[in-house]
Image: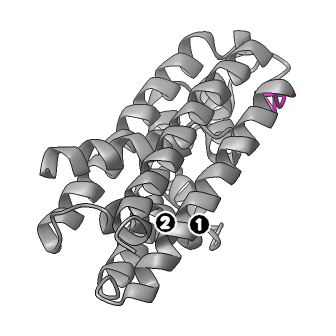
Amino acid sequence: MLWHLFFSGFALSLSLCLDLGMVNVAIVREGVQRGFWPSFLIGVGSSFGDLTYAVLATTGVALLLGIPEVRWALWIGGTIMLLYFAFAMIRAAVRPKSMDADDGSANGQAAPRRSSLRSFLWGWGLAIASPTAILWFATVGGSVVAKSPVQGALALASFLAGFFSAGIVWSFGMALLASTSGKRLGPSFVRAISIVSAALFLYFAVDVFLDGYRSFVAPL
């Protein structure tokens, strides 16, 4: 069961990473302009930023899981939010965003070097800059933890370990791709990651809904 929580956290984090937001754009842009290491550090910083919200949200939710009304709210709210994110990813696949990585280095000159600490803090700040993310972790992450038969600190640690690991793996892959072939990334790449993300969100939406139905509605 702990391995299941680990992979649930991993897959949820991956579905969030697949959203073409400002962090992914920053990773690609940095990889094109400055190379792999600064780009990877932005991703690592954003992973720690996401983990900050994940710890706050899932810890707070875990303390309330004994209240039936809270579990009902997590079931319904988590399902709705997962469906919303799936819809957003389907829309992104139909009309992919531009991933223009050209910035100050468009004239062919190398961009100024940035310290490792500054790259890390930049990534962390990009993740923290969206305080509404705590709602995502509280509803979606909380729903996954709430439906697990394993509860307590060990369950949370397994879920968060998987969540954080996926962020690091994704950051490594994106930084490597951006630093080697970032200028060739186009709408087809955006469409592909959007489709995979939508599939992951739909899977978790069905999983959370069916588990909640069996737990709350079927026994009535």
- Amino acid type at mark 2: Phe
Q: Which residue is mark 1?
A: 133
Residue nearer the viewer, 162 or 21 = 162
Closest to the observer: 161 or 181?
161
Mark 2 to mark 1 CA distance (whole Å): 6 Å
Q: Nearer the viewer, mark 2 or mark 1?
A: 2
The residue tagged 2 is 137
Which span is picked out in magenta?
95-104
Residue 98 is left or right of residue 63, and the answer is right
Query: Is the residue 34 above or below the residue 24 in the image?
Result: above
Secondary structure under tag 2 reads helix
Q: Residue 29 location, x and y as percent?
A: 68, 32
Q: Main secondary structure of the magenta part?
A: loop
At 64% from the left edge and 67% from the top edge, which residue is drawn? Answer: 129
> Do residues under tags 2 and 1 come within 8 Å of each other at their CB atoms?
yes
Residue 48 drawn at (x, y percent): 40, 58
